[in-house]
Amino acid sequence: MKKDPCDSQTRRAFLGTATVSLTLPAMVSAAPARLKPRYIIGSSMYGYKPLAEILPECSKAGATAIDIWPKSHGNQREQLEEMGEDKFKRLLAKHSISLGCITQYHLGPFGLQEEMRVAKRLGCTTIVCGARGPHSLKGEELKSAVKTFMEQMKPHLAVAEETGVTIAIENHARSLIETPDSMKWLKELRPSKNLSVALAPYHLPQEAKLIAQLVRDLEGCIEMFYAWQHGNGCHMKQPKETELLQMPGRGKLEFRPIFKALGEIKYDRWTEIFMHPYPRGIPILETVPQVTEEINRARTYIDHCLGAR
């Protein structure tokens, strides 16, 4: 009998190429191939490594674009500033990689106007940030706060429309947009389609059916999907084998229903295989090749769970 490519034995085989060994839960059966993810690499996965070392890795990891992060998670946005836009463009062209996203949490949604103009000059159409403001709200109080946020965003969304940039708000913990309801209100109340969601399962209950239904509810309003689970968290020092439980295929979250839902809504925006190391600013594994190998292990897991052969 032909073995299911997502059974537990094969899953352990995926881990054989990684730098640490783990005991993993059993896998589910493969789903029909309905989605071909557009992979983008988060520069912070490589810590403070130079862009000249990271960019060649993107194509090795099946990605066509890079998402550059500033300090303290990475420093590639500062590297861009130091080398200048023209040199950065030449570096991208050399490796046939585009700038797909700039992540800018410290600027926040109200501080992105100049960054959007930089993004336009560099051919980048996505900026990810969080939504500062009240959190842990529910019901009408939540709806009212999201509505106020939409009013405050209007002048910034005018620049987003002018520059062709989509501002993607991550459902970050302890922020206005953190819960499924807050993301659904964002979709319903947004004054422009240049405002969207960067969906991070890490910050949600680790229930695949719940996340899959949220994907369906947010159809047309997801700009970035992080293939990222909570695992054992990322805010404390711990053995590498438990820190890596954030990666797809290592922790307990079953990604198959989530990717099935993304296929159902014909999702065609960015997919970023992701985790945070502790402390921030270091690569997820010691060397550049090891980081790429771990991203590829996760990508192989995702591809098989999509039914790829």
Image (cartoon, grey):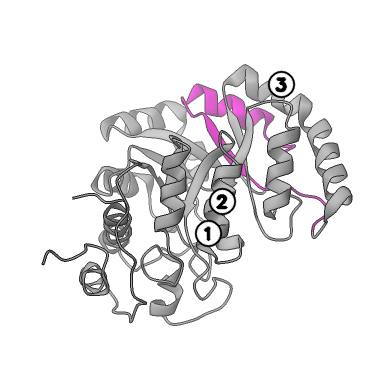
Looking at the image, which is closer to me, 261 or 88? 261
- The local secondary structure at tag 1 comes to helix
Query: Residue 217: x and y, percent?
Result: 61, 43
Tell me which residue sits at (31%, 56%) in the image: 305
Q: Is residue 139 visible?
A: yes
212 sits left or right of 260 in the view: right
Picture quadrant where residue 108 is located:
top right
Q: Amino acid at mark 1?
A: Lys
Query: Residue 179: x and y, percent?
Result: 69, 55
Looking at the image, which is closer to me, 276 or 70? 276
Q: Is residue 107 visible?
A: no
Reading the image, the residue beneath label 2 is 213
Reading the image, the residue beneath label 3 is 158
Reading the image, the residue beneath label 1 is 209
Tell me which residue sits at (52%, 53%) in the image: 212
- The label shown at residue 295 is none
Please determine whether, in this image, residue 267 is positioned above or below residue 261: above
Q: Nearer the viewer, mark 3 or mark 1?
A: 1
Tell me, yes or no, whether the two marked residues, 3 and 1, touch with CB atoms within 8 Å. Answer: no
Q: Amino acid at mark 3?
A: Ala
Query: Residue 142: x and y, percent?
Result: 83, 50
Q: Earlier in the sequence, mark 3 or mark 2?
A: 3
